[in-house]
Amino acid sequence: MHKIKILLLFIIFVNINLFGQNSDLEQHRFIDDVRFGGGINIGVGSSYSTFAISPSVIYDFSNTFSAGLSFTYIYVKTKSIINPTTNHYGGSVLALYKPIKNLQLTTEFEQLKVNQKYSTIDVTDLKQNALYIGAEYVTGNFSMGLRYDILFDKTTNIIYSSALTPVFRVYF
């Protein structure tokens, strides 16, 4: 009887030890689901040129849903004599949803501060808000698509001439 008890304890100890070595049960680290990257945008028109860069960090909550933060800088150069260049900077909160393999649906709230000068008047307290919804084609780490600003008002928007803008993103 005593040998059976020792044998059972030995089997339990070996099973617990082997169970503790199982790599499937390793603790999942937060940083494993964080991706870095961002997007760029270049716009050229008859009277203006824009360059935008948006580095961002997102967290993958699952294989289909991610969310994160982004910083945005936009440089605008126009043919205007009064104000040939403008700088805009700010941030955004974004969510990415992938219902099928190569399609990504996006929402993004962006707020930009306008740093602009008219002769001797400095206009730096102006803020430009945008709420984008969009769709992107995804292949690997790269995505491209279109987004639409549902808050767009042509009379008050000083950055974009249209509510529809292209998006190019890369995440690693």
Image (cartoon, helix red, strand yellow):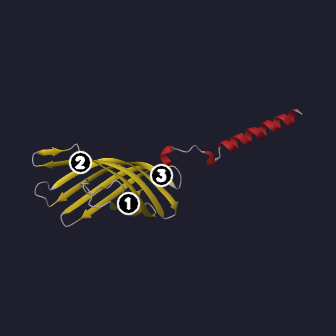
Circle 1 packing at 10 Å, graded few (<14), some (14-19), many (20+), is many
Could you tell me the amino acid type at mark 3? Ser
Quadrant containing the N terminus in the rendered view? top right
> Left of 11 or right of it: where is 112?
left
Q: Quadrant of residue 52?
A: bottom left
Q: Earlier in the sequence, mark 1 or mark 3?
A: 3
Q: Earlier in the sequence, mark 3 or mark 2?
A: 3
- In the depicted view, which residue is nearer to us: 41 or 82? 82
Could you tell me the amino acid type at mark 1? Arg
Q: Secondary structure at mark 2?
A: strand
Q: Earlier in the sequence, mark 1 or mark 2?
A: 2
Instruction: Looking at this view, name the residue that lies furthest to the top.
Output: 2
Query: Residue 147, which numbered label?
Result: 1
Query: Residue 66, which numbered label?
Result: 3
Give the x, y percent position of residue 90. 30, 47
Numbered-mark total: 3
Is residue 170 visible to us here?
yes
Q: Quadrant of residue 125?
A: top left
Could you tell me the amino acid type at mark 2? Val
Q: Residue at x 41, y 62 (%)?
A: 143
Q: Which residue is mark 2?
A: 114
Is residue 172 visible to us here?
no
Q: Secondary structure at mark 1?
A: strand
Rounded to the nearest angstrom, the CA distance separating label 1 from label 3 is 17 Å
Q: Would you say the residues marked 1 and 3 are in contact, meaning their CB atoms lie under 8 Å apart?
A: no
Rounded to the nearest angstrom, the CA distance separating label 3 from label 2 is 29 Å
Circle 3 packing at 10 Å, graded few (<14), some (14-19), many (20+), is some
